[in-house]
Image (spheres, grey):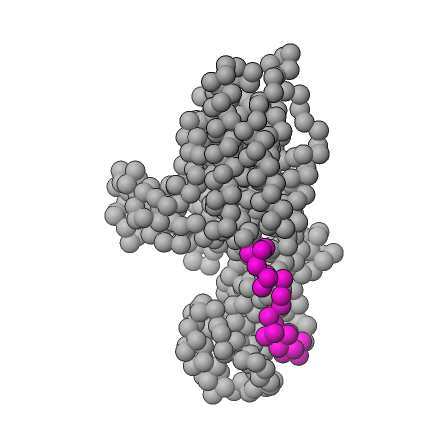
Amino acid sequence: MLRKLKRASGAAAGAAAGAVREPTARGRRQPPGPTLPWGLAAGFFVVYAALSLSLHRRMLTYGYDLGIFEQAVRSYAAGDLPVSALKGPGFRLLGDHFSPVLATLAPFYRLFPTPLTLLVAQAALLAVSVVPLSRWAHEAYGRAAALVVGLGYGASWGIAAAVEFDFHEICFAVPLLAFSVTALGRERWRAAAAWSLPLLLVKEDLGATVAVIGAYIAWRGPRRLGLATAVAGTAGTLLEVLVIIPAFNPAHTYAYTGVLTGEGGRGGILTRLLHLPLDLITPQPKATTVVLLLAPVAFMALRSPLIVLALPTLAWRFLSDTPAYWGTVYHYSAVLMPIVFGAFVHCLGLWAPGGSAHDRRTVRAALTSSAAMTLLLLPQFPLARLADRATWQTPPRAAAAHRLMDRIPDGATVSASNRLVPQLTSRCTVTLFGFPGIPLTAEWIIADARDPMGFPLSAEDEARALGDARAAGWHTVAEDDGYVLLRHPPA
């Protein structure tokens, strides 16, 4: 499958080097049929779903975060507000992040109550985001541009990293941003605003992106619409962070204010904003992230004003004192990829279709460079796993783990190692074994004593915790290939 993707990308690079066709009589290409954009989306859906489902089958998904999100969707499917035992006894997730958009998955989860439902839904949402960007590129410069942009975006490392790391609510934001950025580039101002506003239901920090979209509309289009959108984005984030989330949080606060207050950093928000230009490139992982964000589009996105939409996400990530936010792993860059590729397509408009020979050469060079960077980066990031034989093989230990988990009855309370959690959350109430601050009150414990993930306990600490559990009354029911199942006798 990866070889097919590479061959298609190579074909796109070759096509990009060919002649750019003349525009229509109206100076604009006719809209493409659905075949190419939706064909690309269908192909990437298969790729994303295959990788996600393979990781889950190989027990490489985690309680943090797939288990948490499944508990949220499971609550919605039962007609309740989202609760996650993994975050704490009766913890209300709207007190952690404001993501009511997860409720849209509840009907599908009622039909298919499994974590695979979340993974497949994420694959579909990410794949759909290919459609507006490839369609826009096709309308601007034809099939070659659509292939370069569609394949380059779909195979981009930011999207691939999100696919690899479980499920996250940002999968809803990615297509919304792709449609909104495309509408901005095509100066369809009302559509741009309409696609952006649902971002307020995805996560509280995305209101800042909505505000920047509104500012862009006010600058380049209808001022009143832009200002209204900017106010809605700003007010939405403030309402969520200052009112809604604290109302659900057991400590009546927003747990992620450290970025704004400067905890562990240089001081308050004003001081940190003054240092923002330096913080965007230091320490080194931040500079690497910025370079890799722009590399797939040959750095040409910097020529489009649409690139300013990336600033809110980059600001909160790089102002944070958490190193995990700075780099290229995890899902944090997925929301930036539609912006970067949208800015790329937009900047191609600087050279009008059917213009001078110099303009056509510039477009060819840009598309060829983008396709080449896609091919260069592809083996370095998660989609390359599709070419690895191990991706399609189930580890022998997985069967041992399932033999023990099958002995746990449905509806039981279980404390499990991180990799085992999402194998159980569809039918049990699950907590994370050894998580600090969460009391061990489960009926069952199942742990990986041989090869724990290392979160929240090291191998040595997990072995010690199992010994403590046995001393506290849990007895060993079974052991198999390094997995241990314990049960606490009924009172």
**Residue 352 in sight:** yes
Residue 396 is inside the magenta segment: yes
Q: Residue at x 60, y 85 (%)?
A: 478
Image coords of residue 102 (percent x, y): 60, 50
Q: Quadrant of residue 68?
A: bottom right
**Residue 210 in sight:** no
Q: Nearer the viewer, residue 402 or 273?
A: 402
* Depicted 440 relative to depicted 262: above or below: below
Q: Quadrant of the C terminus?
A: bottom right
Q: Quadrant of residue 299?
A: top left
Image coords of residue 226 (percent x, y): 49, 24
The magenta region covers 385-408
* Depicted 142 relative to depicted 451: above or below: above
Q: Nearer the viewer, residue 97 or 34?
A: 34
* Depicted 357 relative to depicted 131: above or below: above
Image coords of residue 202 (percent x, y): 55, 44
Q: Residue at x 63, y 20 (%)?
A: 29
Horizontally, residue 272 falls left or right of residue 396, namely left
Name, please, the residue furthest toward the top.
25
- The secondary structure that dominates the magenta segment is helix
Horizontally, residue 233 falls left or right of residue 12, namely left
Residue 20 is inside the magenta segment: no
Q: Residue at x 42, y 43 (%)?
A: 292
